[in-house]
Structures are given as C-alpha cells and as structure tokens.
Amino acid sequence: MVPNFWDPKAQLERPEIPTTRSIRFLVDDDFPPMHFPGLDGTPTGFSVELARAACERLGLTCTVQVRRFDTLLGALAEKQGDVVAAAIPVTTDLRRRFAVTAPYFKIPARLATKVDQTTKDMPAFSPKVLQGKTIGIVEGTAHEAFAKAFMPNSTLKPFTELTAAEAELKAGGVDYVFADGLSLALWIGGEDANGCCVFAGGPYLESRFFGEGIGFVMRSEDEALRRALDYALQQLWKEGKYAELYLRFFPFSPF
C-alpha cells in the first residue's frame, strides 16, 4: 500500500522562485530506508530522493550535504543549508522555530503476529482478537502508552529493546508485538524474521501518540520555498513519482 497524505481537493499554486537559486539539502546518513549511503557512498534513501525529485520538479538545482543527525537543525539555523530532508518528527516546538511542509511520510504503529503455520494465511484480525492476548511492547514508548490506553483487556509484556520483543514473538512467547511500523516492516521483510510473522490490522496514526509525521524543514523566513516544496510534493504524488520512490525504498510497506 502506498500512503497518500495529500487532500485531492486542495489545488496548490506554484510560487515564484528564481530558477537560478540552488537549494542545499541537509541530511543524515544513518536511518535506512529514509536516508543512508548508497553503494558508491552517495547519500540516498526515500527522503533524499524525494528531495531531489522535488528540486527537479521545480526546475531548481540542488546539493545534498551529510551532517550528523543531532546537528541538522543547528546547521539550518546558522544558514549552512536551506532545507533539512531527514526524518525529524514534526512537533509544535519545531513549527515554532522553523517552517515545515505538510507531512510527506508518517511512521505508523503496527501490530505484528505469527503466520498461521497450517494455512500460511494472515490471521483474521479484529479488536476482540486482542482480548486475553499477550502483547510485547517497548517500555517507555508512545506505543506502550497507547496500548495501556486502548488495549486494556490484553496483557502487556515490556521489553527494553524492540529486537528482544521481535525474537520473543518469533519464538511464540507473545501473541503480538505493538511497535514502530517502519522497524517492524524491515524486520518482517528481512532475514531475521525468516517469514515467521505478518502485520495484523491496519496502521495506527493517532497524532497525539505518534506525532504529525515528517516534512521538509526550512527557516521561517523562507516561506516561498516552503510553499514551493509543498506544491512539488503534491505534484510528485499526482504524477506517480512519489509511488515510484516509495515502492523502491519500501518493498515491504509499513502501511
């Protein structure tokens, strides 16, 4: 499933930006599949290639500079770059300090469970299925808080690391794991899971628990650039480029 974060009724207009302007994107290279080094060392990933596609759609030139994740916003504020194209969660505090596009990605929460070994089909799922079941969660996370609020008839088993919860699910020690859907998707589609597990139910996107999503971040005074990138992102969705990039970097979708 390719997610859609754009209102089809909203028709954004392209603002005027000089085509001579070069946009400097700042990224981190340690969060695959969003941003990571390619085989030749060049930064790539879903966020990075989406940024490049947006530049091309606007007819602008751009560069991609790699920085340590914890230095990205500081470098942006100090005008060492123009746009942060990394997976920084959009929050109220971030919006107070910077301009942010509409979200181009959200990391959903998901339930994972074992494949029925007799049928190899995804287990039937409904909220009632969770009653009396044991659900592995990572302690101290928004997923734990959500599970405590909305899965009261289940037994929650806390783990300090997601990898430990995944191993316990594979071994049959818990009925479900409720966690970050992106990390779970990488595990389910990878060698460690060895085809043991699948998603159950749909994605959970409640913003008060799991945030507003991820957008491009720029300085507050660069409002024309923000509107231009919002326009470009919407066009990339309509024209199918977003779906092309999504399927390239998310062969096993977290949605």
Image (cartoon, rainbow, N blue to C red):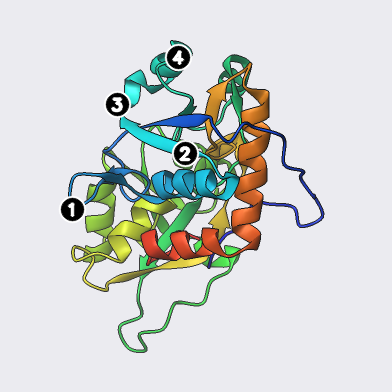
Image spot of residue 243 (x, y percent): 52, 63
- Tell which of 22 and 189 is nearer to you: 22
Q: For mark 3, does the 10 Å Cα neighbourhood hold few (<14), some (14 to 19), or many (20 or more) residues? A: few
Tell me the CA gap for discs 1 and 3: 18 Å
- Element at badge 1? loop
Q: Earlier in the sequence, mark 4 or mark 2?
A: 2
Report the residue marked by disc 3. 67
CB atoms of marks 1 and 3 within 8 Å: no
Report the residue marked by disc 4. 79
Q: For mark 2, does the 10 Å Cα neighbourhood hold few (<14), some (14 to 19), or many (20 or more) residues? A: some
- Element at badge 4? loop
- Tell which of 119 and 34 is nearer to you: 34
Q: Quadrant of residue 31?
A: top left
Q: Earlier in the sequence, mark 1 or mark 3?
A: 1
Relative horizontal placement of residue 75, taking residue 18 as reference (left or right): left
Q: Earlier in the sequence, mark 4 or mark 3?
A: 3
The disc at residue 39 is: 1
Which residue type carries mark 2? Thr
Could you tell me which residue is drawn at 45 percent across and 77 percent down?
A: 123
Report the residue marked by disc 2. 61
- Element at badge 3? loop
Tell me the CA gap for discs 1 and 2: 23 Å
Which residue type carries mark 4? Lys
Relative horizontal placement of residue 121, taking residue 152 as reference (left or right): left
Q: Earlier in the sequence, mark 1 or mark 2?
A: 1
Q: Depth-wise, is mark 4 or mark 2 nearer the camera?
A: 2
Can you say whether 119 is above or below 83 in the image? below
- Report how many numbered discs are placed on residues in the image: 4
Could you tell me which residue is drawn at 59 percent across and 55 percent down?
A: 236
Q: Earlier in the sequence, mark 3 or mark 2?
A: 2
